[in-house]
Image: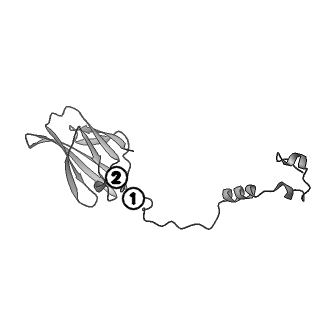
């Protein structure tokens, strides 16, 4: 399933704002689609520069004003900062807008061993008691067999 986010680009104020909080978990893979909503931007190319929490970065050209965050972009928890720039004839225009999003760590790594718990939850205990319930145990084995077929008894 792909999570799609609309990001509104304001080149006048130099900001990029999402339509809702962007929720990313470290190691998500190819599941985040960023759709940039850009008004009045006459440019041959729209280029996004991403700076990752570990200090590395990458540069991508937007295709149809969209970017899919690949798994190699989501390896580290922290804040991804990004800048969208416009280019004409291989020259950068002065317009740019900045944004950021946070990648949170996974609650448990896939390699984490989960220890079994030797304590049974109360619901499991009660279910097992009902499964093992014998109507004849209620009155010492003198259940009225006329009703015991339907669960009636003593």
> Pointer 1: residues within 10 angstroms few (<14), some, or many (20+)?
some
Report the residue marked by disc 2: 29
Q: Quick one: SS at disc 1?
A: loop
How far from the left and from the top, in percent, is residue 62?
21, 42
Q: Nearer the viewer, mark 1 or mark 2?
A: 2
Which residue is found at the position 48% from the left and 67% from the top? 113
Residue 46 position by quadrant: top left
The image quadrant where one finds the N terminus is top left
Q: Which residue is mark 1?
A: 105
Q: Position of residue 22 (x, y in %)?
A: 36, 46
Question: Viewer-proximal residue, 151 or 85?
Answer: 151
Q: Residue at x 81, y 56 (%)?
A: 134
Q: How far across and how far down the image is residue 43, in percent? A: 14, 36
Way the structure is coloured: one colour
Observer-nearest of 61 and 139:
139
Q: Quadrant of residue 41?
A: top left
Tell me which numbered mark, 1 or 2, is placed earlier along the sequence: 2
Where, by quadrant of the figure, is residue 74 drawn? bottom left
Q: CA distance from mark 1 to mark 2?
A: 14 Å
Mark 2: give few (<14), some (14-19) or many (20+) Cα within 10 Å.
Answer: some
């Amino acid at each position: 399933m792909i999570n799609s986010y609309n990001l509104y680009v304001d080149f006048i104020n130099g900001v990029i704002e999402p339509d809702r909080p962007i929720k990313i978990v470290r190691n998500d893979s190819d599941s985040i689609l960023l759709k940039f909503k850009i008004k009045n931007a006459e440019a041959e190319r729209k280029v996004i520069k991403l700076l990752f929490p570990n200090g590395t970065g990458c540069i991508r050209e937007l295709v149809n004003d969209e970017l899919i965050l690949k798994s190699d972009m989501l390896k580290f928890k922290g804040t991804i900062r990004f800048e969208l720039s416009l280019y004409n004839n291989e020259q950068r225009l002065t317009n740019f807008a900045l944004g950021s999003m946070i990648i949170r760590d996974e609650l448990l790594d896939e390699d984490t061993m989960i220890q079994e718990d030797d304590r049974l939850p109360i619901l499991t205990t009660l279910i097992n008691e009902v499964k093992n319930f014998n109507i004849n145990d209620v009155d010492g084995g003198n259940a009225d067999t006329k009703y015991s077929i339907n669960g009636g008894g003593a």
